[in-house]
Image (spheres, grey):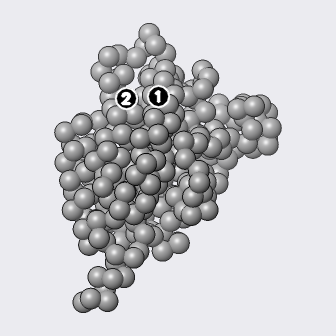
Amino acid sequence: MPGTQTANSERKTLILTGASRGIGHATVKRFSSAGWRVITCSRHPFPENCPWEMGPEDHIQIDLSDMDDVARGVAEMRERLKDQGSRLNALVNNAAISPKLEGGARMNTFDTSAADWLRVFNVNFFAPVMLARGLVDELKRAQGSVVNVTSIAGSSVHPFAGAAYSTSKAALASLTREMAHDFGPLGVRVNAISPGEIETSILSPGTEKIIPQIPLRRLGQPEEVAKAIYFLCTDASSYVTGAEIHINGGQHV
């Protein structure tokens, strides 16, 4: 029906990688509650216990460590956006991997194999730029936003995050600036959020020892990160691009 098509084309759409838990899960709930359509992406099938509307129908299974599969995923995303006038209001690159040694110990530069370096950088660094490049027309049409999720580990050696993870996040912060420069003339804003110690199920054992070093003396909540992501994807931040917002209770100071 014409009315339905008009409503679909006016509804804002988010594509989010890494949505099944923690920051990603909170981000889905934040945008969904504001009426956005949320298209989620992960290497796993859609988890049945996720509560958002149209979740199973708007989930794309994709292996971000495989650039051929990323290209396939981009084609599927573009096809799914056609019913909304091929417009994409926001792309949030949240998915990331941080392999550990047996027992959960961090992998330093000596411990990390060439295969692990490549896999981490494919997921954490190359996938975000390939997704944004592949969806540039849809982002331009909506004058949309890209948000890259970096990390406090990208600016100093972290007690738990491995060398490959940390350097990939540092590279992603630099990439955010480059993308802001390149996408800006198209009317597309590109920013990053850099979380610190956020209370999720994937926190490393011993994280509580870091709390006394955090000025706010507590861990962050996934919802606090999701609010910052939402800010960067809406008109409230219409003149913000190339920024990296630290969400770490002052841990970086």
**Residue 171 tag number:** 1
Mark 1 and mark 2: Cα distance apart in space: 9 Å
The image quarter in which residue 229 lies: bottom right
Residue indicated by mark 2: 121
Residue 196: x %, y % from top left: 63, 38
> Measured along the vertical axis of the image, is residue 83 above or below residue 183?
below
Looking at the image, tell me whether mark 1 or mark 2 is earlier in sequence order.
2
Identity of the amino acid at label 2?
Answer: Phe
> Measured along the vertical axis of the image, is residue 108 above or below residue 174?
above
Q: Is residue 127 visible?
A: yes
Residue drawn at 49 percent across, 51 percent down: 189
Q: Is residue 208 left or right of residue 70?
A: right
Q: Label 2: state its secondary structure.
A: helix
> Measured along the vertical axis of the image, is residue 104 above or below residue 57?
above
Residue drawn at 72 percent across, 34 percent down: 251
Identity of the amino acid at label 1?
Answer: Ala
Q: Nearer the viewer, mark 1 or mark 2?
A: 1
Q: Is residue 150 left or right of residue 121?
A: right
Q: Is residue 103 visible?
A: no
- Report crowding for label 1: few under 14, some 14 to 19, many 20 or more residues within 10 A (C-alpha): some
Residue drawn at 50 percent across, 65 percent down: 31
Q: For the residues labelled 1 and 2, say whether their Cβ atoms are less than 8 Å apart.
A: yes
Q: Quadrant of the C terminus?
A: top right
